[in-house]
Image (cartoon, rainbow, N blue to C red):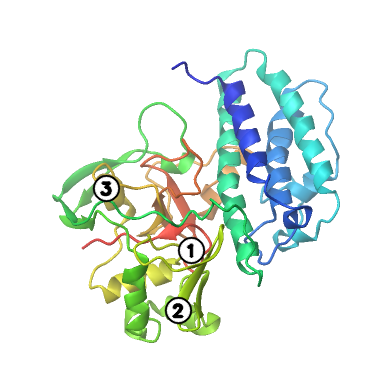
Amino acid sequence: MPCMSLAEHYRNTRQASEILCQPLAEEDYLPQLVEYASPPKWHLAHTSWFFEELILKKQLEGYQEFDSRFCFLFNSYYNTVGERLARNARGDISRPSTATVYKYRQHVDAHMQRLLSGPLPSDLEALITLGINHEQQHQELLLSDLKYAFGHNPIFPVYREDGSLLDDRNSNEGLIQLEEGLYEVGFQGEGFHFDNEKQAHKVYLQAFEIDRALVSNAEYLAFIKDGGYENFSYWLDDGWHWLQQSSIRAPLYWHLINGEWHYYTLAGLKKLEPDAILCHVSFYEASAFANWKGMRLPTEFEWEVASEQIPWGLRWEWTNSAYLPYPGYQVNAGAVGEYNGKFMINQMVLRGASVATPAGHSRKTYRNFFHPHLQWQFSGIRLAK
């Protein structure tokens, strides 16, 4: 099969974002219930802003920006670029209309295709590839954020009848044993990777065991029924404080209705499937569950070393590793230097991928990262000891 050209990769990725939005009504493009979950309209515009601001305005001679106000409206966190709208105000942008945002995308795409039609220096190809992967990240965020809005709507709207994304089950069980020793971790070789996956380096690991299977709903339900949310001894102090402040007593989207557990899926509200793989738990919950089981979460390096022997890709898996730079990590100059490095504080690493991750956008060295209290990603638990 011939290798996909950069122009094809760009075009397919941009189309995929719009396909995700096809089931939406006009009203679905705007709601923002919490600061960290952005509306679909903002995702569509911001991913276009990335190509316009970081590529077209600098690389395509004679390029005219679509609307000079969009640089302020759709910048996410790039201080290098300039001022931006407050993150919690992204749902306030009733104008420009959704139709205008789609016209913006068409404008950017037409000029990007013009740029992609000719030869490009390697550094520009790399930047465009980063933009493509950036949009793929936002495709997953778009689904997560949309689910948050729909999941807090009292009528539990259906995004797609076949779009539950929570029906998968484990196909393997038991523990894998790995020997102590010196291992190489981090990205090596050719192909795209984010800067936080480098430099490759050696780590020494003690012997450990890791589950082949991810934790199921039934296993987590046993934790709840055993008073897991009421017993402080399972929880980190930060996690216990979060629990008291939030009054959370179950994974996100779980509802106890007439004595029976249900959960919201993108296919609507459904009865909890006991054998399905657990989803939408925070690091705090994952850690408390592991303590309750007399086990622990793997470190990100244990996970990476074990990754070739375990099935993964169904849930982002919390690790017990803080998000920190690797030895030799260097922040790039300019706006792309703000992509990862400045977030290496107060966050935990997740490894793998999830059912919401676009095809081809995962690898064993991928380091996802979120604050430990957040539940809204498609996150689950794998245990180690």
User: x, y percentage for residue 322?
Assistant: 40, 59
Side of 385 where 17 appears, left or right: right
**Which of the two marks, 1 or 2, is nearer to us in this view?**
2
Residue for badge 1: 346
Q: Which kind of residue does numbered mark 3 sit on?
A: Ile
Q: Earlier in the sequence, mark 2 or mark 3?
A: 2
Q: Secondary structure at mark 3?
A: loop
* CA distance separating discs 2 and 3: 33 Å
* CA distance separating discs 3 and 1: 28 Å
Residue appearing at x 44%, y 28% in the figure: 191
Examine the rendering and report whether any part of residue 80 can be seen: no
For residue 286, which numbered disc appears in the image? Answer: none
The residue closer to the viewer here, 20 or 67, is 20
User: x, y percentage for residue 110?
Assistant: 76, 25
Whether residues under marks 2 and 3 lie with C-beta atoms below 8 angstroms apart, the answer is no
For residue 260, which numbered disc appears in the image? Answer: 2
Residue for badge 3: 310
